Amino acid sequence: MSSKDDNDDDDRNSLTALIFFAAAAAVVIKLVWDAIDRNRHLPPGPLANWIPVVGFLPFLMSGGRESQETMCRLADKYGKIFHLKLGSSIVVVIADHKLFRETFKRDDISRRTVPASMDVMDGLGIVHANGDMWKSQRQFVHGVLRGLGMVRTSAHRKVEFEEKAMAAIGLFLAEVEKKGGQPFDVDYLLSYTVLNIFYSTVISTHFQPEDPQLKAQIDQTHDSFRIQKTLTIGNFIPVFRHAPSFKKTMATIMGRREDCRNFFRKIIAEKRSRLDPNNPWPDLIDAFIVRMDRDKHDGKTSS
C-alpha cells in the first residue's frame, strides 16, 4: 500500500471522527438547550438539578429526618415554591400549607403523578386516585370530616371529636403509668394512640394496646416505611424497577396491601349489615357506604 493510500485512509478516519464528534456535540447542545428552555417555565431550584441522569435524587436517598431537613433548607433558600429534578421526573414542591390548599382548589390541578411504589391501590382511594375521581373523593372526605368535627364545624361536633381524641390520649397516659417510671420504647404506644384516634373517626372503634390485629398493622406499617427507602431510585429512574430488590420489596408491599384490604372488607361488611341510611352516619365508613350506594343507584362511578 502506497503512502498516498495511507494518507487517504487517515483523512477518511479524521473526517469520520470529526462528523461523530460534531453530531455528539449537536445532541448535547440540543439537550442542554431543551433543558434551559424547559426550566425557564419552572420555579427556582438547586444547581444539583443539572446533574445528568440522577439530578437532585442522591441528596434525598437517606430518607427520614435528613431528607425533611434538606427540603426545609431548600424552602428557606428558594421560597415557598421550588422544583427538583429527581431522575427522569421533574417535581414541583409547594412548601406552604395555605398555598397548597389554594393550589389544589383549581380544576386544572387534578392530575398527579404517583410514584410506582405508591400506586399499590390500582389508582383507587384518596391517596392514589387521580383526575375527577380524586377531586370527588377529596371533596367528599373533607365534607365528612367537617361533619365529624375534625375541621371547622359546629361546637357540638367539635366537642364529640375532642372527646374521642381525649379518650385515646387517656389510654396512652394509663399505659405510660403502668411502666412505673421505667424506660421503654414509646414508638409503638404513640402509633397506637394516633391509630385509635383515626379509627374512632373512620370506623367508630377503639382498640386495646395489646390487640394482636392492631399490633400487626403497626409493625407492618413501620416496616413498610423502612423498606420504601429501597424503592426510591426505581420510582424516579424506571430502569431500576427491573432490579430483583425492587421487585421483591414491591411483592412484600402488595402482600400487605391485601392484608389491609381484608381488614377493611370485614369491617365494611359488618357495618353494612347494620347500616341505617336514614340516621346520621357516625363515621367515615358509614358515610362512604351511603354515598357509594347512592352513586351506584344514580349510575355514577366517579366516587
Image (spheres, rainbow, N blue to C red):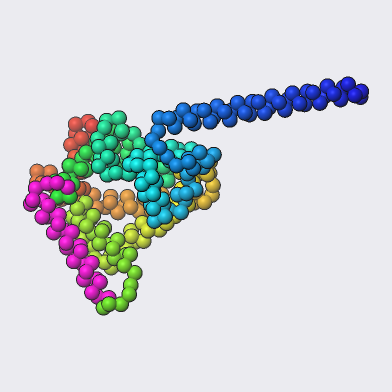
Q: Residue at x 21, y 60 (%)?
A: 206
Residue 159 image-quadrant placement: bottom left
Is residue 33 on the magenta stretch?
no
Left or right of 61? Residue 257 is left
Residue 51 at x, y percent in the picture: 52, 41
Q: Is residue 128 visible?
A: no
In this view, which residue lies farthest toward the right? 2
Residue 163 at x, y percent in the picture: 13, 59
Q: Residue at x 44, y 55 (%)?
A: 227
Does residue 22 sit above or below 90 in this rendering? above
Q: Quadrant of the N terminus?
A: top right
Q: Residue at x 28, y 51 (%)?
A: 264
Q: Quadrant of the C terminus?
A: top left
**Viewer-proximal residue among 73 and 15:** 73
> The magenta stretch spans which residues?
151-179
Does residue 56 sit above or below 32 in this rendering? below
Left or right of 246? Residue 172 is left
Residue 146 at x, y percent in the picture: 16, 45
Does residue 225 sit above or below 105 in this rendering? below
Is residue 177 on the magenta stretch?
yes
**Viewer-proximal residue among 211 and 109:** 109
